[in-house]
Image (cartoon, rainbow, N blue to C red):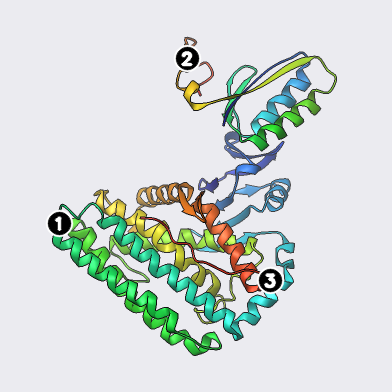
Amino acid sequence: MELLVTNYGSFLGKKSERLILKENGKVVNEIPFHDLEQVIIDTPGASLSTDMIRECVEHGVQISFLTSTGKPFAKLVSPYLTGTVITRREQLLAFFDERGVSLSKLFITGKLKNQINVLKYFSKYRKGVDRELFETVYRAIDQIEQMADQLNGIKGRCIDDVRGQLMSVEGRAGNLYWQGVKLLTGEKVNFPGREHRDSTDPVNSLLNYGYGMLSRQVEGALILAGLDPFGGFLHVDRPGKLSLVYDFVEEFRQQVVDRVVVAMVNKGIAVDMEEGMLSTATKQYLSEKINERLESQEKFQGKKYKLRTIIQSQARRVATFLRGEAKYRPFVGGW
Amino acid sequence: MKTLVIYDIEEDKTRTKIFDACKDYGLTHIQYSAFFGELNHNRRDELKQRLRKTLGRKNGKILICPVCDKDLRLLEIINIEPGGIPDV
């Protein structure tokens, strides 16, 4: 469970083994620490008690503080989470050898396969209704499939040798995928194609907000797995850039965010904008839907797990892979 | 599995502790001295041990009863008291 604190003057405390949320001195929510996964404080003027902080840290629950624009400005975690020296040392060394190459390739493979499955998911009911559209989307799917095969041929000794090639495949597949998404959302909404930053159209704003939520989730998972969220492979180093988060998030974007956003658009849910930004109501609706999606189950290694759990266990697998203990296989959601 | 926890405990202080333990396990207070909610096998066992320890040698009786979904569909509630404890 994720606790979002949005009201001015909220107080977070601890009672027995539960987190207590008080507003104006009255208890409004009680959550057992056992069921809690993340605390997000999205308001000025909230206060926390130290024993609540301690309990959160001991349960691996991160407390994130956001500015009014949704940017995280602080985070409370145990100082010993960075105590996973072997993992972090291997992670940084992997940048210079083949581990970085194979991990990046696997992330991109996962991304492409999920793009394919999301397109399949949204076109499966169109087969009988709109044959032409169905076939156009499937042509895109075939092309993305070919690109996924091309990835196998890319070889190099370190990530710097192959970054360009990988990015090129990723970019071309992305173009096809977003064209497919555009077709599938049809006339329901004006989707100009994917824009990354500061977009003012509804679909891109929804996607950007959703990716922000997902990135926080993924970042938490990586930190708990003992990895350094800044030490990426495919995304180059830059101070303050969470490169590993951006690398690792690729295999989850489509299944978690895109699916929710496309479904929202197709259902014809009104997306209100205020001065080029999503309205509070829309944000709340979207975050509710994304949390529902994270709680929903997907097949993973022969069993069904919540997507949230899959993200965490994939983060641990990245760590074991980097330590050279096991293979890594990207998560591919169903359709 | 959904679990029903009901108890009769003489001493107020112990009863409060049992009450708190149930809430710590995420159960909902459905009646005086009755809690209900989702617990898996392990959590149910943990709760049992905690309740046993809390009760110690004092007088009281606690029932922890798992309920399957099929039976739960037959649940009937008769509630007349206005402003009483909310339903499940």
Is residue A107 rendered to the left or right of residue A62? Answer: left
The quarter of the image holding the N terminus of chain B is top right
**Chain where mark 2 sits:** B
The 10 Å Cα crowd at callout 1, few under 14, some 14 to 19, many 20 or more, is few
Three-letter residue code for mark 1: Asp
Q: Position of residue A122 (x, y in %)?
A: 28, 56
A233 above or below A120? below
Of residue A87 and residue A71, the one placed in the foreground of this image is: A87
* Residue to which mark 3 is pinned: A87
Q: Nearer the viewer, mark 3 or mark 1?
A: 1
* Residue to which mark 1 is pinned: A130
Considering only order in the chain, which callout, 1 or 3, is on the residue closer to the N terminus?
Answer: 3
The 10 Å Cα crowd at callout 2, few under 14, some 14 to 19, many 20 or more, is few
* Numbered mark located on residue B77 in the image: 2
Residues flagged by tags 3 and 1 on a common chain: yes
Figure disc tally: 3
State the separation of the CA atoms marked 2 and 1: 49 Å
A307 above or below A14? below
Of residue A103 and residue A69, the one placed in the foreground of this image is: A103
Task: Tell me if I can see residue A272 in this picture.
Answer: no
